[in-house]
Amino acid sequence: MLGAIIGDIVGSRFECNNYRAKDFELFTDKCSPTDDSIMSLAVAKAILNSKPDHSDLSDAAVRYMQQLGRLYPNSGYGMMFRSWLMKRAPQPYGSFGNGAAMRVSAVGFAAQSLADAKIMSDMVTKVTHNHPEGIKGAEAAAVAVFMAHSGKSALEICDVIDKEYYPMDFTLDEIRGTYMFNSSCQGTVPQALMAFFESTGFEDAIRNAISIGGDSDTLAAITGGIAEAYYGIPDDIRRDAISFLDERQLKILLDFESKYPPVAEKARQHRGMSGYA
């Protein structure tokens, strides 16, 4: 799950100031956690505090998204979600925004099976983003994290995404010059997935995501969650990233990692899939 937070922190300074190359400094004093990190942590806390069978996961997701969201009101929430955060009896509002996909990486680490990942993703998503495209975007991200965490190859993951979710019929080089800011799942999740598929390591995946522009923090958060599950996170990047978290945020992360241990950095025989399309 930290991978998603890292992507968000790195991408935070580029969301309104896109940089379409990979030669940038990962962390600067202009970086910060945004709504992507806050909601990723909220979903993680919901998973930790739900029943073993996760039958109450939707209720827990509402509870902790509202709780944390209200504690961090200036984190960059969309207008509809900001309104949802403040309601006594919040209801889903038909959204297909990419917020559905940026917050689900914890599901991929906690799920016990592919079917479980899909069910859990639906449960934490439908409380806000109940549009079919919102459900699909979140599920695609959760499935990719789960498969990566389960040791599947990038090609295996890509085949599933291509057949069941989005056509992976493009390359980053093909879209880098024209891709624009898009806050929808269908306009963000495929691109974030391709940033992982073309990567050669965790850091390279984050750089890929930033390099195409668009909604940089959310793109990199989605990519980072998958990249962590596949590659693990280098120690120096982990150390730098957690320095941006406050005590409350760090506690949720460490509580989650104590139950669902993070992936140790590992060498994967994967040289990127830029020729897949």
Image (cartoon, rainbow, N blue to C red):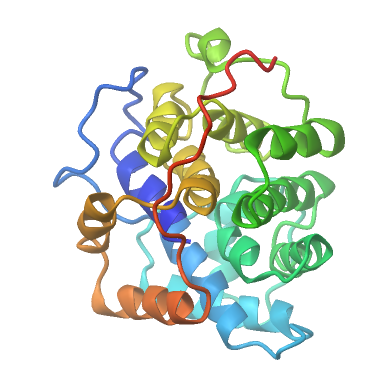
Residue 106, horizontal then vertical, whole percent: 57, 65
> Which image quadrant: the C terminus?
top right
Residue 24, horizontal then vertical, whole percent: 23, 27
Q: Nearer the viewer, residue 30 or 121?
A: 121
Tell me which residue sits at (55%, 47%) in the image: 226
Q: Nearer the viewer, residue 245 or 157?
A: 157
Q: How many marks?
A: 0
Residue 189 lies left or right of residue 234; in this view the side is right
Tell me which residue sits at (47%, 9%) in the image: 177
Residue 3, horizontal then vertical, whole percent: 43, 53
Residue 277 higher or lower than 193, as above or below: above
Residue 53 higher or lower than 210, as above or below: below
Tell me which residue sits at (47%, 72%) in the image: 261
Residue 271 lies left or right of residue 250; in this view the side is right
Tell me which residue sits at (27%, 66%) in the image: 245
Judged from this view, the residue extending furthest toward the left is 29
Q: Nearer the viewer, residue 86 or 258?
A: 258
Residue 74, horizontal then vertical, whole percent: 35, 60
